[in-house]
Amino acid sequence: MPSLPALTVFVPTFVLVSLTPGMCMMLSLSLGMRLGVRRTLPMMAGELAGVGLVAVAAVVGAAALMLRYPAAFMLLKWGGGAYLVYLGVMMWRDRGPAGTVEADSRTTGTGPANLAVQGFVTAVANPKGWAFFIALLPPFLEASQPLAPQLALLVGLILGIEFCSLLLYAGGGQLVRDFLHQRRNVVLLNRVAGTLMAAVGVWLALD
């Protein structure tokens, strides 16, 4: 198992990285603004599943493949950016009551299954997440110890920290939404969130 000194470095490092605005956190913020924290939970579940998959894959070999073929990394980067721009455009086009907690779950793209898929795809298509796990996880793994228990502990810590960060961002979005909780501002809120999401997508593709 990772040593206690190693964990005291790993935990605060990942807390800082997780709290840094990025694809997943901006999605959580925008959905918290539009739907509230409770209805954003399916997206968080999908995002956590994606993060766990990326973390494990980065350790067991996908990292080496991507480093060997930089074109794969670039395609993932551009694909993730394009997906966020797409989400931003969908938010801009949404003129329904999606900005209220009482909104019907049938509103385009806001059903639990759709939200879970959004979270999963956003996490898996985030090249910065891949790069982070490639760089961070291996140094904390002891080659002389069994891999599975170490990886289970580190991924468990990662998912716990990531969930808290997602809740924090979604809660912040809900506070903004509640502050402007008037039906005539629904379109404005959707467009602010959509612009933010599209901007992150462009930044990701060009960075």
Image: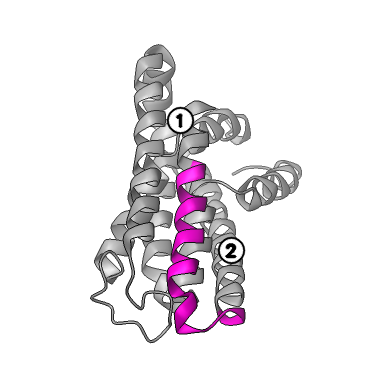
- The magenta region covers 178-200
Q: Residue 21, how many percent across, how many down?
A: 61, 49
Q: CA distance from mark 2 to mark 1?
A: 23 Å
User: Up-down: is 34 above or below 93?
Assistant: below
Q: For numbered disc 2, what is the local secondary structure? A: helix
Neighbours of disc 2 within 10 Å: few (<14), some (14-19), many (20+):
many
Q: Is residue 187 within the magenta segment?
A: yes
In this orientation, which residue lies closer to the viewer: 45 or 185? 185
Camera-nearest residue between 186 and 207: 186
Give left or right: position of 86 versus 9: left
Q: Residues within 10 Å of mark 1 (few under 14, many from 20)?
A: many
Q: Position of residue 193 (x, y in %)?
A: 49, 59
What residue sits 55% from the left and 75% below the top? Answer: 177
| Label at residue 22 | none
Describe the element under mark 1 as helix, strand or loop: helix
- Point out the tag, 2 or 1, that comes first from the N-terminus: 2
* Residue visible at 43% across and 25% down in the picture: 63
The reply, left or right, for residue 191 in relation to residue 13 is: left
Dot 2 and dot 1 residues touching (CB under 8 Å): no
In the picture of the structure, the residue carrying the numbered disc 2 is 169
Query: Residue 14 or 144: which is nearer the viewer?
Result: 14
- The answer to which image quadrant residue 166 occupies is bottom right
What residue does disc 1 label? 205
Which quarter of the picture shows residue 187? bottom left
Quadrant where the C terminus sits is top right
* Amino acid type indicated by mark 2: Tyr
Q: Position of residue 97 (x, y in %)?
A: 36, 78
Residue 7 lies, in percent from the top left, at 69, 46
Q: Amino acid at mark 1?
A: Ala
In this view of the protein, can residue 79 be seen by the observer? yes
The quadrant of the image that shows the N terminus is: top right
Q: Is 61 drawn above or below residue 15 in the view shown?
A: above
